[in-house]
């Protein structure tokens, strides 16, 4: 029988070994996955329902500095100060179809040069971005990307604007992100020699989740795209129909990396989508059209997308109403179809409810999202809950939430700026 001293020594050695990066990288995700499986078995996240509108009424937006921008542009160093309710943009009307490239698209194109790599735990975004950059000759890997944009290995998501910021700040290349993408647009970019990175949804073992992939080819004869997937492997064929359905859940978001001397080509391929406002108007109309042709979860995504695009057009009241419709549909979905991780990846409802003066909805949505997680590590949810608490006069609660956001994302710029504004140490 082991003595207490021997058992203590064994535990110390095991702990020391676990701290080694190669060992921790292999084991940490298994420990976290087991913890999450137990937590979700006890408290099924798909049973958690957010009900909007349970507030004491609408209140005017305060003079609050909001740092996170609702666009594909990375956050700027200087704050955006809102002293009065933002001007409301009318609901967009149908826009013209994107300009069709006169050059016929080949029936099949397969780009070489994207070096596949499997992701480490929770590292889909950095792994996929490093794959996309590899096509252009960048020699880094997912660890370098993660160290900059995902310093906490438990962080559940990397936003598209964070990846654009990395490309433009840490490499010699340029990048842009747009929404409302189309199948033909993706094929046009690939035919011109530009792999396309997209954010989409997939159904995993424990429900729906978000995922990034690089599209490196297509074949019209087989009606498939070729995906470089950090989770499922290289050269993965996925049908156009399935891809489009999965892409819908992220507002058809796509990201293109390019060298500086090819920027004019990228803008020409984008057509009207080169202009961000026109892009959001087109995407808003696309979502509106889909609302009336889809059912079930796809209709939920269409309502959510409408809200996101109206939010980006600063029609916050219209956006809030669209999100209300999406959240209203959510309980009617079967439990195994509910995208319960949605607020891990998309923060549009926080913008819409906050700028509509619906601070209780911001707080309730953030709290519902965080409480349903096995590890409540979403810095954006803490950030928005802090802003709403401050708007309602709860300064101590706001400071606590800003600090919590920094615990889960060290150096998170928006929260640092808020604490500086309040004259508080982080």
Image (cartoon, rainbow, N blue to C red):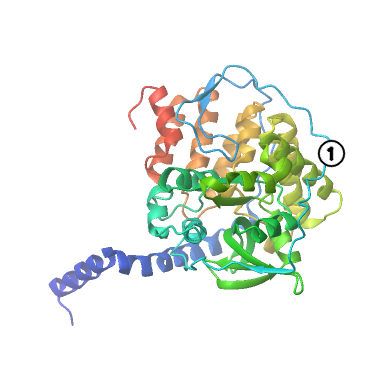
Quadrant showing the C terminus? top left
> Residue 294, can we see it?
yes
Q: Position of residue 66 (x, y in %)?
A: 53, 28
**Is 182 situated above or below 224?**
above
Residue placed most toward the observer, 257 or 362: 257
Residue placed most toward the observer, 362 or 410: 410
Q: Position of residue 337 (x, y in %)?
A: 70, 61
Quadrant showing the N terminus? bottom left
Report the side of 300 relative to 260 (left or right): right
Q: Give the residue at mark 1.
A: 94
Residue placed most toward the observer, 261 or 425: 261
Q: Position of residue 308 (x, y in %)?
A: 68, 41
Residue 86 picture quarter: top right
Name the residue rendered at 51%, 60% in the picture: 128
Q: Position of residue 232 (x, y in %)?
A: 56, 71
Name the residue rendered at 20%, 73% in the picture: 10
Residue 424 picture quarter: top left
Residue placed most toward the observer, 19 or 141: 141
- Residue sticking out furthest to the right: 292
Report the side of 144 relative to 220 (left or right): left
**Is 148 situated above or below 277?**
below
Report the side of 178 relative to 175 (left or right): right
Name the residue rendered at 37%, 40% in the picture: 411
For the residue carrying disc 1, how many other residues have a C-alpha within 10 Å: few (<14), some (14-19), or many (20+)?
A: some
> Residue 225, can we see it?
no
């Amino acid at each position: 029988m082991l003595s207490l001293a021997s058992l203590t020594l064994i535990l110390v050695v095991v702990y020391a070994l676990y701290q080694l990066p190669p060992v921790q990288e292999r084991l940490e995700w298994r420990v976290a996955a087991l913890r999450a499986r137990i937590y979700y078995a006890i408290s099924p996240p798909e049973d958690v329902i957010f009900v909007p509108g349970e507030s004491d009424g609408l209140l005017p937006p305060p003079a609050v500095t909001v740092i996170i921008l609702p666009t594909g542009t990375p956050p700027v160093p200087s704050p955006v100060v809102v002293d009065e309710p933002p001007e409301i943009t009318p609901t967009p009307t149908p826009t013209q179809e994107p300009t069709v490239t006169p050059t016929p698209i080949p029936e099949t194109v397969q780009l070489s040069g994207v070096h596949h790599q499997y992701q480490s735990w929770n590292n889909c975004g950095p792994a996929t971005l490093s794959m996309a950059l590899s096509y252009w000759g960048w020699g880094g890997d997912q660890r370098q990307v993660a160290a900059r944009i995902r310093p906490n290995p438990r962080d559940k998501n990397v936003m598209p604007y964070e990846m654009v910021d990395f490309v433009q700040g840490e490499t010699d290349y340029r990048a842009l992100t747009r929404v409302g993408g189309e199948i033909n647009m993706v094929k046009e970019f690939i035919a011109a020699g530009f792999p396309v990175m997209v954010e989409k949804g997939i159904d995993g073992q424990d429900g729906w989740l978000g995922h990034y992939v690089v599209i490196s080819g297509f074949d019209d004869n087989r009606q498939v795209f070729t995906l470089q997937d950090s989770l499922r492997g290289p050269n993965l064929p996925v049908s156009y129909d399935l891809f489009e359905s999965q892409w819908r859940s992220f507002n058809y978001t796509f990201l293109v990396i390019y060298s500086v001397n090819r920027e004019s080509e990228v803008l020409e391929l984008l057509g009207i989508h080169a202009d961000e406002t026109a892009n959001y108007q087109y995407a808003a109309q696309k979502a509106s059209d889909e609302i009336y042709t889809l059912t079930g979860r796809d209709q939920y995504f269409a309502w959510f997308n409408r809200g996101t695009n109206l939010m980006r057009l600063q029609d916050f009241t219209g956006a809030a109403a669209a999100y209300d419709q999406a959240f209203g549909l959510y309980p009617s979905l079967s439990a195994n179809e509910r995208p319960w991780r949605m607020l891990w990846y998309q923060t549009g409802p926080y913008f819409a409810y906050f700028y509509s003066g619906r601070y209780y909805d911001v707080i309730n949505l953030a709290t519902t999202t965080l409480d349903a997680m096995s590890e409540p590590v979403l810095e954006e949810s803490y950030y928005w809950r802090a802003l709403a608490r401050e708007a309602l006069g709860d300064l101590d609660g706001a400071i606590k939430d800003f600090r919590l956001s920094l615990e889960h994302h060290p150096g998170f710029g928006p929260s640092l700026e808020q604490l500086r504004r309040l004259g508080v140490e982080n």
